[in-house]
Image (cartoon, rainbow, N blue to C red):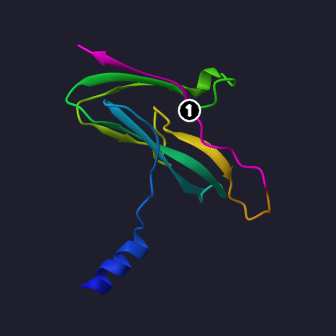
Amino acid sequence: MFFIFFIWSFIFPQSEWETYYENKNIQISYTSQVCNDSRNGFAFEYFIIKVVNKTDKTFVVNFQKSKDEITKEEDKIAFVLNPNQIIEGTCEYDPIKLRIFKSENTGKDSDFEYEFALSKIDVVEVY
């Protein structure tokens, strides 16, 4: 039985989520993931974002996918989070785009990497 669990965990590794923001209503975490686009020959590493509603209430969640001093329209995120819902970004197309570019994964030596940062986090209850 242990052998099956070991093989399963190797084939399907668990993401380690790091909590970035948490209050009594929501938790925002992130992890790093390489997203391969084999059809076009690209591989990029992204920060994948997960938002958890810890209550039985509905919220509108807004935040900026960058530091306070960097404001771009395309980095503004707003979505409805239903009671006890978990929304998680993916490598696939997602209209909410809960991911942030981290680095190219080309095998070249590069010291350039983006750091994970969110700003202007706002949670509004919907009645």
Residue 35 x %, y %: 56, 55
- Three-letter amino acid code at disc 1? Leu
Q: Name the residue: 42% across, 67% down.
A: 13
Q: Quarter of the image holding residue 69?
A: top right
In the figure, 127 relative to 101: above or below?
above
Horizontal and vertical percent for residue 78? 45, 23
From the image, tell me which residue sits under label 1.
118
Against 10, residue 51 (above or below) is above
Q: Is residue 107 left or right of residue 44?
A: right
Image point (57%, 31%), residue name: 65
Q: Quadrant of the C terminus?
A: top left
Side (left or right) of 4 relative to 68: left
Q: Quadrant of the N terminus?
A: bottom left
Residue at the limit of the structure toward the top, as seen here: 127
Between 120 and 40, which is closer to the camera in this rendering? 120
**Residue 79, percent across and down?**
40, 25
Query: Which contiguous range is marked in magenta?
Result: 111-127
As displayed, is residue 24 above or below residue 32? above
Q: Quadrant of residue 27?
A: top left
Query: Which residue is depicted at the point 30% across and 78% down?
Result: 5
Q: Is residue 119 magenta?
A: yes
Asked if 102 appears above or below 69 in the picture, the reply is below
Q: Which residue: 77% across, 50% down?
A: 112
Q: Residue furthest left?
A: 56
Residue 28: percent from left, percent from top: 43, 38
